[in-house]
Amino acid sequence: MTASPVSEDDRQLVEAVLAQVPGAFERLVRQYQGLCWHIIARMVRQPEDTRELCQEAFLRVHQCLHQYRGESQLKSWIGQVAYSVAKRHLEKRRITLVDPAVGDDGDGLSLLDQVSDGFDLEAACADEEIARGLHAEIEALPPLQRTLLTLYHLDGVPIVEIARITGLAEGTIKSHLFRSRARLRERLQARMGVTA
């Protein structure tokens, strides 16, 4: 994985926060609160917990920003903090992160375990009834699969960035995406008779 260069704006923002320039940290929070909220909300699904965990994530960002070395984009680093906070929260509550049927099988992928399997999530979302069913089925996925699927398909985050955020191997992410999509396809077909 090659490191993405840090934008000049992000570099200046980090320097301003570290120099305690008034308003700099608030600007950082405004810029990245959507990303933080999205990751945590997808993982925990409880608005009250999401609010608290977002605050905790930004507290950690503030406390640890001096450790940020610019080896990845600031967005990825903050996403990683948010993901870590949400994951720890779920682990404390003993909530399963991964569907045992999907597992966490590392980089070993067969030819079948590719991201592209012919199922077009975006096209499925175009039909309102199918979209409602699809979103309900996405919500029923375990936290990790739900988060990976929405980051990749709905937010357009590249797999390499998802790997930086989650700390998972790219092959593991691809495998989760493939299997989650297969599960969604089966459930949509059973639920609505949709041929996906």
Image (spheres, rainbow, N blue to C red):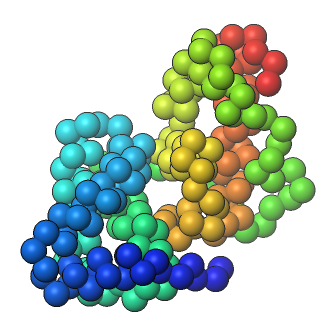
At a point 53% along the width and 71% down the height, the residue shown is 164
- Whether residue 158 appears in this view of the structure is yes
Residue under the image location 19 percent in, 70 percent down: 25
On screen, residue 112 versus residue 46, left or right, reads right
Q: Quick check: 41 above or below 131?
A: below
Q: How many marks?
A: 0
- The answer to whether 107 appears left or right of 158 in the picture is right
Viewer-proximal residue, 131 or 193?
Answer: 131
Residue 15, by quadrant, is: bottom left
Residue drawn where x is 23% and y is 64% of the image: 27
Q: Which image quadrant for residue 4?
A: bottom right
Residue 145 in sight: no
Q: Nearer the viewer, residue 136 or 23?
A: 23
Q: Percent position (x, y) of residue 129? A: 60, 12
Relative vertical location of residue 138 with respect to residue 103 in this rendering, above or below? above
Q: Left or right? Give the position of 141 relative to 69.
A: right
Q: Give how far across and how far down residue 16 sits, in percent.
A: 22, 82
Q: Quadrant of the N terminus?
A: bottom right
Q: In the image, 40: left or right of 2?
A: left
Residue that lies at the very extreme toward the right in this rendered image: 111
Q: Position of residue 125 (x, y in %)?
A: 63, 26
- 153 up-or-down from 183: above or below: below
Residue 110 image position (x, y, % from top left): 86, 58
- Quadrant, the C terminus: top right
Task: Compare residues 9 and 83 and report the one nearer the observer.
Answer: 9
- The residue at 89%/56% (across/down) is 111
